């Protein structure tokens, strides 16, 4: 199945070059792949995996390992940020 | 004590400047800056005063930590009755002006009356005098600062001034200091202009003395700086990406008000984000962002310094916009960009420069343009009236409207009114995205419910800086709450409002609160000031300030009916994102909020509440 994987701010460096212009990477993953598994595959520094959204909805840290993705999902991750 | 214990009172009608002692009894109750200056305004003016009349007063005020070695201790505020809202106005700015005022030996300046001719105030330590500003009238803030420094032969002078917007009565004119920082909201610059006061120029070499316990102060400020440095947000995220890092995340969660809040997500958000500011432009191979910058004493350094492509259509014939200058913050990128459907990063940067150059609040200006674009789309306003085709997405229309408003020509005179008055004039008041006449900023209350209550109850009209619940609802600071839920938000908003009022009265920046709590601020204040400043006392001071501002607004004629959101947010559901199908739950939250505040069902502080707070 295909999902969209997005990384922002300091995490952008973990995207392949061709995806940095959009911060988005189309990703083909096996059915049932979880949020936690995708994070592990990209070796993202745990301290920078702060705000994890699936289709804009926040996924609690405790739920990430068990949250299965489905076709068309958008998984977006930010390090700790704030502003205003 | 870190207070200078001295006020400068300037009577513009008589042309006099006089020193008087700071009311230290009030300082113990209201701390400084926002709280203390508001106390002076309440005590000295009629709340029903016409904001643009000589009877209104304008106060430039510092906090006890302004000018000290506390991190971010460079803040000052401008307090007055706001012409955009008819409510209390308090606009906070960074840069270096506030610290210089304190280092000249003054806690605050109270301006009263109206000068018969344009003047500027010149302060050199304890000497203060009004000087002729006829040659500066009709010029920009950038020209004014340069001309004053040249006239005094001193590049280290700090200047706060109004541009042509403030002179022309643009109701959202701001006071610009250090070229790119601004006391931005509610039209404090229009009040300054109504008094024929063009600028305040300062040189302060006295310094800040009298810190109560210097050893304890050194220890407390060092510890607090470490907290900021060790925090991922204040130590890494803000310095590198600035506030603009919010653009993509707020869009992702479906809370980015787009095209006058017709939508909650903007397809061009990525193009105007922090990430885009870091990228090299195809046109000239250079990035929009040059570097970051810091205000006085700040160890965060979130400021943006940007440069646009000299060959960009908007500046190709305007070399004055070619240099490195203050870049886009999130609010400005939103109000000039997503709010109007414009995703041209350099065009937005130039529009922001014009707002700095002539002193206009980009939030209200941009949101007023978006209301005009909707009226244009509906056919209510025509090209012949505006002077340019003005569909959503037109960067050309945005920039032309910025120029005409700053210069006070053509349709710019109507844009100068703000969206509430303009849309009412054309028969569609429902298209103004404002509360109490002031436009709300970059967070849609349908996608972040706490911000709806924040906007509705903000004492200075819709604003994010009175209770930034986005920190909790989106970023998990101090704890994560659900942005789509209304439950618990009244208490959350109250807590943020009270804490923010205390921070705004201290002389430090509200951005420290992404790492600090009142528990980090209290030891710094306690070491600097006499009186015993604990976390609990600061929370009480914050609550006292909030209720004092509320009482002022009620006395000015505002009522609970003014604690309301634009109809669109209550009746037109979000069309996409997590909030799809949702409207604001303001009607559920507001009664609970009044109760949590100790107010009546009509939003009036009860006698028990005012007695408890010593009001």
Image: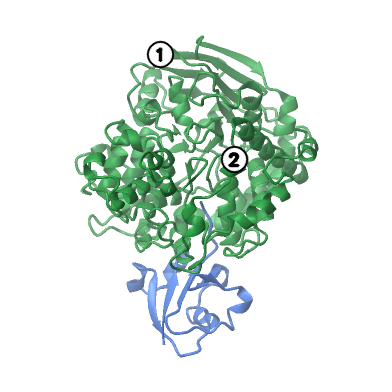
Q: Give percent across and percent down for residue B146.
A: 36, 27
Examine the image and state in which quarter residue B212 appears.
top right
Looking at the image, is B74 positioned above or below residue A5?
above
Within the image, what quadrant is residue B41 found in?
Answer: top right
Chain where mark 1 sits: B
Q: Nearer the viewer, mark 2 or mark 1?
A: 2
Quick check: B517 above or below B45? below
Q: Colour of chain B?
A: green
Q: Quadrant of the N terminus of chain B?
A: top right
Q: Position of residue A52 (x, y in %)?
A: 53, 71
Q: Percent position (x, y) of residue B49?
A: 55, 24
Residue identified by numbered label 2:
B459
The total of numbered circles placed on residues is 2
Q: Which chain is blue?
A: A
Q: Is residue B230 visible?
A: no
Task: Name the quadrant of the C terminus of chain B.
Answer: top right
Compute the Cα span from label 2 to label 1.
33 Å
- Element type at mark 2: loop
Residue drawn at (45%, 90%), measured in percent from left and top?
A30
Residue named by callout 1 = B117
Report crowding for label 2: few under 14, some 14 to 19, many 20 or more residues within 10 A (C-alpha). Answer: many
Left or right of residue B389: residue B159 = right
In the rendered structure, find residue B213 and report the number of the disc placed on it.
none
């Amino acid at each position: 199945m295909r999902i969209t994987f997005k990384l922002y701010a300091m995490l952008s460096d973990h995207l392949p070059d061709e995806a940095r212009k959009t911060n988005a990477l189309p990703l083909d993953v096996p059915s049932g792949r979880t949020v936690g598994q995708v994070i592990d595959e990209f070796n993202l520094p745990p301290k920078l995996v702060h705000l994890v959204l699936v289709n804009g909805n926040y996924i609690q840290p405790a739920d990430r390992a068990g949250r299965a993705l489905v076709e068309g999902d958008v998984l977006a991750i930010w390090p700790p940020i704030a502003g205003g | 004590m870190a207070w200078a214990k001295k006020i400068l009172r300037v009577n513009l009608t008589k042309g006099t400047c006089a020193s008087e002692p700071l009311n230290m009894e009030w300082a113990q109750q209201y701390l400084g800056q926002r709280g203390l200056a508001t106390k002076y305004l309440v005590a000295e003016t009629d709340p029903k005063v016409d904001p643009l009349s000589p009877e209104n007063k304008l106060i430039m005020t510092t906090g006890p930590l302004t000018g000290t070695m506390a991190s971010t201790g460079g803040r000052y505020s401008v307090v007055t009755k706001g012409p955009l809202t008819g409510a209390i106005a308090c606009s906070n700015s960074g840069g270096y002006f506030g610290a210089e005022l304190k280092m000249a030996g003054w806690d605050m300046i109270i301006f009263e009356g109206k000068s018969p001719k344009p003047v500027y105030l010149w302060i050199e330590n304890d000497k203060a005098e009004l000087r002729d500003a006829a040659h500066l009238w009709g010029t920009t803030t950038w020209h004014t600062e340069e001309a004053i420094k040249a006239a005094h032969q001193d590049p280290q002078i700090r200047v706060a001034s109004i541009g042509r917007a403030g002179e022309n009565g643009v109701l959202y004119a701001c006071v610009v200091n250090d070229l790119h920082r601004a006391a931005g909201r509610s039209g404090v610059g229009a009040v300054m202009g109504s008094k024929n006061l063009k600028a305040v120029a300062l040189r302060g070499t006295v310094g800040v003395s009298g810190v109560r316990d210097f050893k304890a102060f050194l220890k407390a400020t060092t510890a607090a700086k470490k907290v900021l440095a060790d925090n991922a947000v204040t130590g890494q995220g803000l310095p590198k990406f600035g506030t603009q890092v919010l653009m993509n995340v707020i869009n992702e969660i479906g809370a980015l008000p787009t095209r006058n809040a017709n939508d909650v997500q903007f397809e061009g958000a990525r193009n105007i984000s922090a990430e885009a500011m870091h990228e090299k432009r195809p046109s000239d191979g250079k990035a929009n962002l040059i570097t970051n910058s810091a205000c006085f004493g700040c160890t965060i350094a979130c400021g943006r310094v940007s440069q646009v492509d000299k060959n960009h259509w908007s500046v190709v014939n305007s070399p004055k916009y070619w240099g490195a200058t203050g870049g886009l913050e999130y609010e400005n990128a939103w109000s000039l960009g997503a709010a109007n459907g414009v995703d041209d990063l350099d065009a937005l940067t130039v529009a922001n420069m014009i707002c700095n150059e002539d002193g206009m609040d980009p939030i209200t200006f941009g949101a007023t343009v978006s209301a005009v674009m909707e009226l244009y789309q509906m056919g209510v306003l025509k090209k012949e009236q505006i002077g340019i085709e003005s569909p959503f997405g037109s960067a050309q229309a945005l920039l032309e409207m910025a120029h005409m408003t700053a210069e006070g020509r053509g349709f710019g005179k109507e844009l100068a009114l703000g969206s509430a008055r303009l849309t009412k004039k054309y028969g569609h008041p429902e298209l103004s995205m404002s509360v109490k006449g002031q436009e709300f900023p970059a967070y849609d209350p349908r996608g972040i419910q706490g911000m709806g209550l924040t906007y509705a109850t903000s004492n200075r009209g819709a604003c994010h800086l009175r209770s930034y619940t986005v920190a909790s609802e989106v970023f998990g600071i101090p704890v994560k709450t659900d942005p789509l839920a209304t439950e618990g938000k009244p208490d959350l908003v109250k807590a943020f409002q009270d804490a923010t009022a205390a921070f705004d009265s201290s002389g430090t920046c509200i951005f420290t609160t992404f790492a600090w709590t009142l528990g980090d601020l209290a030891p710094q204040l306690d070491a600097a000031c006499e009186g015993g400043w604990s976390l609990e006392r600061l929370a009480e001071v914050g609550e006292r300030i909030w209720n004092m501002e509320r009482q002022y607004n009620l006395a000015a004629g505002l009522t609970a009916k003014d604690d309301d959101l634009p109809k669109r947010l209550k009746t037109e559901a979000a069309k996409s994102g997590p909030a799809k199908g949702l409207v604001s739950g303001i009607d559920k939250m507001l009664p609970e909020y009044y109760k949590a505040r100790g107010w009546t069902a009509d939003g009036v502080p009860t006698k028990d509440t005012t007695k408890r707070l010593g009001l």
